[in-house]
Amino acid sequence: MRIATYNVEWFNNLFDDEGNLLEDTGWSARQGVTRADQLAALGIVFTALDADAVLVVEAPADNGRRSTVRALENFAARYGLRTRKALIGFRNDTQQEIALLFDPDALSARHDPRGKKSGSRGAAGAPRFDGVFRWDLDVDAAPELVTFSKPPLEVEAVLAGGRKLRLIGVHVKSKAPHGASSPEAQIRIAIENRRKQLAQCIWLRRRVEEDIAAGDSVIVLGDFNDGPGLDEYEKLFGRSGVEIVLGEECGPCLYDPHARLALSSRVGAMPVTARFYIHEQKRYLQAMLDYIMISPDLRATNPSWRIWHPFDDPVCYRTPELREALLTASDHFPVSMDFTP
């Protein structure tokens, strides 16, 4: 069984309102890449990935005019993918949904949100992810109201052999200081965004603990926009959101080998899943942002992880068509995990 996560940069821009693929010479959201070239590259990557289920981060929008499911299933049909069924949870207004593409011959899947509805005043504990979480962000004894711009996707997956999995797909809010008008404002906004992000990860961690306590096999996967040692603001708060979700200090720990490597040694070469071009510096920045974290019972199956990096993975590098497709398709690279159910 292969489970994967893949952040596809602005997948939404590759479809019209009816969910038809825009295989033309118009520009995609990727600089210098046409929509036809990005779609063709994605077809190559998804085919090579050959996963039983793929969490698609930045999936096409779902609203009154557009359908995430229709667009993704049209994409799968166009490229003959066995992951031909799509599923979303709570829609959002960012044009970047969280969706699951899966092979219906390998598993069934349904959106299965947990937690109580919170109402606009919020709730403590672990309310439903489309609700409001009450948490004191700045330690002033006055809890703030925290929401997800992209509510995590909770999936009950039943494998062909009968085993159930609990998948939680995430795209945690970026902590980039957008809208800053001065260096001081940049620092203030960055700290505020970091606090919100950590609160979201605490909310997510509480759900993980509830699911494991209920006896579920849990997989948390997606883009955290965060990781151990990623920026200087981690020093201010003591730990990253990834560490919070993993549960390093209390309760049953989740496991991801790439996160473990980053936690054990923050000096030297580290695995990376994303590559961004910094125009001001005329160079690429690489970061570890995408994870597949699993509960202890799944770790006992001795799974194996793989980052489909065009330069760091030997098979990807030695396969020119795949290597170039990975560079063209997105600014993130897929992460997969193979295990025996």
Image (spheres, helix red, strand yellow):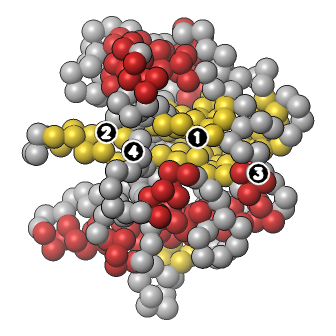
Q: Residue at x 41, y 63 (%)?
A: 265
Crowding at label 1, few (<14), some or many (≥20) Cα neighbours within 10 Å? Answer: some
User: What residue is disc 2 on?
Assistant: 275
Q: Amino acid at mark 2?
A: Arg
Disc nearest the viewer among 4 and 2: 4
Is the Cβ of the residue at disc 4 closer than 8 Å to that at disc 1?
Answer: no
What label does residue 102 carry, if any? none
On the image, which quarter does residue 86 sit in?
Answer: top right
In the rendered image, which quarter is residue 101 located in?
top right
Tell me the kind of residue under disc 3.
Ala
Compute the Cα span from label 1 to label 2.
19 Å
Residue 180 in picture, x, y percent from top left: 19, 63
Q: Earlier in the sequence, mark 4 or mark 1?
A: 4
Q: CA distance from mark 4 to mark 2?
A: 8 Å
Quarter of the figure with the N terminus? top right
Residue 199's x, y, as percent?
Answer: 50, 70
Q: Amino acid at mark 4?
A: Val
- Distance, label 2 to label 3, CA atoms, is 32 Å
Mark 4 Cα-neighbour bin, 10 Å: few <14, some 14–19, many ≥20: some
Residue 300 bears which disc, if any?
A: 3
Q: Which residue is mark 4?
A: 272
- What residue sits 41% from the left and 72% below the top? 195
Judging by the rendered image, the residue that carries numbered circle 1 is: 305
Q: Earlier in the sequence, mark 3 or mark 1?
A: 3
Considering only vertical position in the picture, is 187 above or below 279?
A: below
Q: Earlier in the sequence, mark 2 or mark 3?
A: 2
State the residue at coordinates (29%, 58%).
176
